[in-house]
Structures are given as structure tokens and as C-alpha cells.
Image (tube, rainbow, N blue to C red):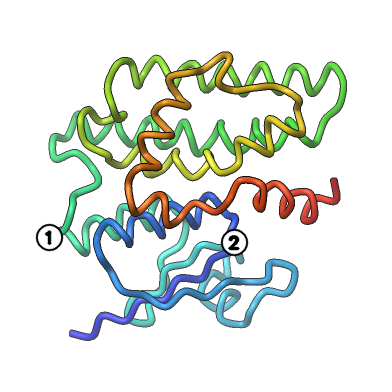
Amino acid sequence: MANEVVLLDFWPSPFGMRVRIALAEKEVKYEYRDENLRDKSELLLKMNPVHKKIPVLIHNNKPVCESLIIVEYIDEVWSDKYPLLPSHPYERARARFWADFVEKKTYTTGRNIWSTKGTEQEAAIKEFIDHLKLLEQELGDKPYFGGDKFGYVDLIFIPFYSWFYAYETLGNFKIEESCPKIIEWAKRCMERESVAKTLPNHEKVYLEIKKVYGL
């Protein structure tokens, strides 16, 4: 069976980074196509006609959309290499819960930091830190969210580490002062080849965010 894989993505997207890390962990060869989100390609519009967003994984000419769904798809299709989700149903459910938490909270509250000013920004920073503290509690003293092994929640969350510098710079605060365990965990993840080769330079991400959002 043919195994043609194409990824439509935008390099600073934390959602696309998830897919790239998953593909790296599974040692899947693929063609990478970086999209101009202000002038979306015909292929992107055709493959994701509902949301018209990246990332889109095209596997044998069939599109899979939404990063959480794509990562689970990759885990199921290439099941012979490095499982990402836990095997036990309860642990798998917990992993999906925390991945959903990251999905719904981290990106939204992070954006609020640079889209607000004054007391609104202070409230956004507090909310962001409160969410990180909940994640820190879930992490506990474990090396990774799933235990001793890098897994699904780590993969879903770690791309945002490349955006932390932008949050801190635009909000004038330091994440490590409130959530040192999250920073320790992030640095541990960065020792992993799949992560280190995927996450872009944080200053480059910061400059791109300023350009895209007109900051």
C-alpha cells in the first residue's frame, strides 16, 4: 500500500508542531508544505473546506484535520512505533482530558495577554498562570505527564513552550517565578530529539507573532 504523507502547516503554529513531533516520534517520512495563512493555497481550502485552517495531514490523498485528531490518527495508523497514548482505557481518558484542557485554555488565555492592556492584561496573566498551576499539579513530581515516559499530553502541550517568551515579553512577567516545575518539564522535553528539532527559536516566534498580530 502506498504511504504518501503531506503536512500542510505554518511553521510557528503550536498545533502544527504537535503533528510534526508525532510524525518524528513515529519516524514517518512526509512532505512539508508551509502555508501563507493570508493567501491560503487551493490545496488547503480543498482539504479543509470546513475550517480552512492548518494543520492538515494528507495521507494517501485523504485529509485529516484538527491537531488532536491528527495526533491520535498518527498514533493509530503507525501503531508499531512508539505509542503516544496510554494503553489503559482510564489513563487514556485522563490523557485526553488534559490534552483538551491545554487545547481550550492555554492558547486562548495566552492570546489574551497580548490583546489586552492594563488591568485586563493583569487578569489575563493571572488566568494564564492559574491554568499552568493546574497543569503543574497534574504533573506533580513525575518527569512527564504520563509518568516516566514522554507521551500524549507532553506532545500536545510542549509546543506552547516556544511561545512562552512572547507571552512573557508582551506581558512583562516570568512564568518560571510562578510555575518552576513547568519550566523544568519543558527543558526535559527539549532534550528529546523530536521536540528539539521541531520547536523554533523563541525570539523568532515572538517577532512573527508581533508581525502577524500587528503588535
2, above or below 6, in the image:
below
93, above or below 210, in the image:
above
Q: Which residue is located at x 41 percent, y 60 percent? A: 20
Question: Could you say which disc has been placed on residue 51 in the image?
Answer: 2
Q: Name the side, left or right, on which 8 lies relative to 57.
A: right
51, above or below 128, in the image:
below
- Binning the other alpha carbons within 10 Å of mark 1 as few (below 14), some (14 to 19) or many (20 upward) gives few
From the viewer's side, name the closer residue of 148 and 213.
148
Q: Which residue is located at x 54 percent, y 35 percent? A: 104
Q: Which residue is located at x 73 percent, y 33 percent? A: 169
Q: Quadrant of the N terminus?
A: bottom left
Q: Which residue is located at x 77 percent, y 55 percent? A: 212
From the viewer's side, name the closer residue of 164 and 107.
164
Whole-percent x, y for residue 114 in the image? 77, 35
As shown in the figure, which amino acid type bears the numbered disc 1?
Asp
In the figure, residue 19 lies in which quadrant? bottom left
- Binning the other alpha carbons within 10 Å of mark 2 as few (below 14), some (14 to 19) or many (20 upward) gives few
Q: Are marks 1 and 2 in contact (CB under 8 Å)?
A: no
From the viewer's side, name the closer residue of 7 and 25.
25
Whole-percent x, y for residue 108 in the image? 64, 36
Indicate which label's residue lies in the foreground, 1 or 2.
Answer: 1
Q: Determine which residue is flagged by label 1.
A: 80
